Amino acid sequence: MSIDTLAKVDLYSVFDSAIHPSVLARWAERAGENAPSPSELETAYRVEKVEQIAERRAWVKGLLQTPADLTEAALDTARRLIAEVVVHVEWVIDLAILQLPGMTPADVLLALDAGCNEAVTERDDVFLSWSFLVLFPENSGHDDASALVRSLATHPDVQHLGGFVVPGDGRPLDWAIGAFEVCKEFSLGRVVVAGDQRDAARILSGVQLGAQRIIGGTAALVREDILLQLRAHRVPVVALPTAQVLGGVAPRGWPSLPMKKMKEAGLFTVVGSGWPTWLGSSLTSELEQVSKHLHWRLDDLRNVTTRCVEAGFMAPNLRFSLARTVEIWRHRPLVQAQVKGGDPFSL
């Protein structure tokens, strides 16, 4: 049975870094740049080092011209997720990249919503839901961050706001205390990027601040007190495997992924796609690599999806719908094989 047939949930995908190369090529051509040919797209946009991602994202910002570009990108990306049987995605929205002149943060989310809504009306065999995790701008102050949360949380037209993300900029987290309190007021998720750059203390600070999700988290493995806190509060830790390999967090490559030790330590671990366009990956390929190198079975991968549904920032009725969808797709290949007259157990 192929991983392609498993329903999947992605809890950390940076939206501007998930726009497909074919869309970027059209925008580049519009801007008068020499865009790669279709046959070159798969490799032309890939990075060799994680440090190159920031430069590529700045390039995307320069290509964006109108809110319609955001809607186009959302429509194309949502269609691809549906084809990949991703049933829920939580997109990280970096306003520094996506907010065009004259647009408010709410305008960005509404433009993205328009594309997603169009995509989900085209098929009825895959249920796709989504939410937005807004990244606090770097160097945000206490008042700025709190005001951003409140403005989006109270906007009458914003429908898919899931939470906010504290970037891994190395600063102490005190500035985010007020913003997290506003998040709690409106039942919004709180995410902290920490722990893939030897910043174990930042993980502990995030948990104490009330973070409901840690991105990275590998530095926790060196401190038992932090592991105890993560287990006690059942804080999900999202691993980004390809980024960890390119970033040197897995010093011996894929077989040394920290996820193995994190799972053995009893942490609530899940997998995200991170920056799929620049890494030349997808959530499916991330899971394939994890399965191959860590010897995870299909049941292990199904359990990852179940944990993602549990950890997602969503209403209870949506969580129920997603759990039901995941269960339906668990058996779908067997049903399809039986309808076609084949042997379902040969898949």
Image (cartoon, rainbow, N blue to C red):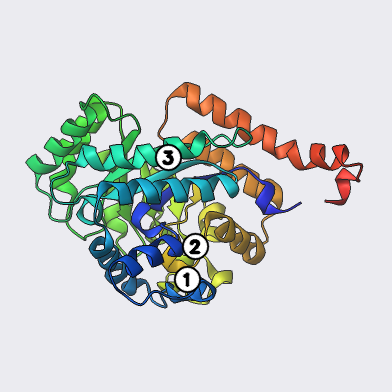
Q: Nearer the viewer, mark 1 or mark 3?
A: 3
Q: Is mark 2 on a helix, strand or loop?
A: helix
Q: Is residue 127 left or right of residue 155?
A: right
* Contact between labelled residues 1 and 2, with CB atoms less than 8 Å apart: yes
Q: Which one is in front, 45 or 208?
A: 45
Q: In this view, does 180 lie to the left or right of 88?
A: left
* Residue 106 sits in quarter: top left
Q: Which one is in front, 177 or 73?
A: 73
Residue 329 in percent (x, y) is at 68, 38
- The Cα atoms of the two marked residues, 1 and 3, are separated by 31 Å
Q: Is mark 3 on a helix, strand or loop?
A: helix
Residue at the extreme top: 317
* Residue 180 sits in quarter: top left
- The Cα atoms of the two marked residues, 2 and 3, are separated by 26 Å
Residue picked out by circle 2:
241
- Name above or below for residue 338 compared with residue 3: above
Residue picked out by circle 3:
116
* Contact between labelled residues 3 and 1, with CB atoms less than 8 Å apart: no
Amino acid of disc 3:
Cys
